[in-house]
Amino acid sequence: MITALLLLFAAAGIDDSFRTGLTALQSGDLESAKRNLEAASKIEPRDGRVWIALSQTYWRLHKNAEAEEAAGKAAAMGPEDPAVLQGLAIYYSETNQTLKAARAQAKYSEKVPENSEARERGVELYFAAARPLLDQQKFADALVILKEAVSRIANSGQLELALGVAYYGLRRFDEAADAFLRTIEIMPEAEQPYMFLGRVLDQIPSRWARVTPQFAAYEAAHPASAEGYLLHAKALNAQSIDPETALRLLEKSIAINGSDASAFFEMGAVLDRLQRFEDAASAFEKAVERAPQDPAAHYRLARDYERIGKHDAARAERDKHAQLVKAQEVIR
């Protein structure tokens, strides 16, 4: 860090006490650094670069209050100085003030747009500030940080994905879908946004027209992935269109991964649309075998058992569905 500061400060004209203080800071002679930098601060009290160097010196001397005060003066005296902004980002990062570090780093990266590493560091810091909140399911608090992040650092797939997760956790599904779609535009090779969109598909009918071609593209790009075929089929099922294509996609998905209950559930839904009720019941049976705690599969199976005249079996499935729904309500 100190070497980076020296390189940034070297280009500007600085007095001898400042230069001596920086050299002492680099070599670890903290008392000399303190003495000389304090002298420099009296000569140039409005130079933010002096104060950011002092903040580092005080912090390394475990004078935390003085370090924080010096950092505040640096921010006030040099709010547009790239050297000060980078120094603040480093100081706040080292003192575990991650959100302040992210803000300083983002502003620094705006000053040096040719520096891709500066931008990526800003992304990392904003994500580091939001991730503990996401992990703790404090989605509203994370959302505040992430909305700020994407406004300060545009076109970051990582930040858009995290923003989508925050909206998802708040059950704001349309906004989550928009964030996941932006993630796909930025990094179409990432798997997570497609998976999240698959989870909320039933909740975002106004986005189906945008989501479906993305699922189709993902399927085409990942021919060995069972998920690609499944997601494309789910989008077609959600819109009640093209059942023959959906059936073909699900057959491919199941051929790759026959353990996924959701693929058999979607297969049952397609076969219901085709009025092939015995085949649909068989598909829902397989879904129930693989996910016995899913009430929706029991409900759909009960309905198809009624259609094909298996009334006792239908009654048993309805009872199981009711038990599972009641158990879920108790958990909530």
Image (cartoon, rainbow, N blue to C red):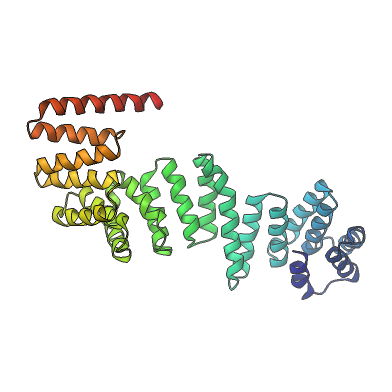
Compared across the picture, whether 284 is left or right of 50 comes to left
Give the image location of residue 284, x and y in percent.
Answer: 20, 40
Give the image location of residue 161, x and y in percent.
Answer: 45, 54
**Compared with residue 308, is residue 265 higher up or lower down, i.e. above or below?**
below
Compared across the picture, whether 304 is left or right of 178 comes to left
Q: Residue at x 76, y 67 (%)?
A: 5
Residue 169: image quadrant is: top left
Compared across the picture, whether 207 is left or right of 281 comes to right
> Which quadrant is home to the C terminus?
top left
Name the residue at the left extreme: 309
Q: Residue at x 59, y 60 (%)?
A: 122
Q: Nearer the viewer, residue 82 or 301?
A: 301
Number of callouts: 0
> Which quadrant is home to the N terminus?
bottom right
Give the image location of residue 82, x and y in percent.
Answer: 69, 67
**Compared with residue 180, is residue 332 higher up or lower down, i.e. above or below?**
above
**Compared with residue 286, is residue 1 higher up or lower down, i.e. above or below?**
below
Q: Nearer the viewer, residue 29 or 119?
A: 29
Residue 322: image quadrant is: top left
Q: Residue at x 77, y 68 (%)?
A: 3
Compared across the picture, whether 298 is left or right of 65 comes to left
Give the image location of residue 192, x and y in percent.
Answer: 41, 54
Q: Residue at x 70, y 53 (%)?
A: 92
Q: Nearer the viewer, residue 53 or 283?
A: 283
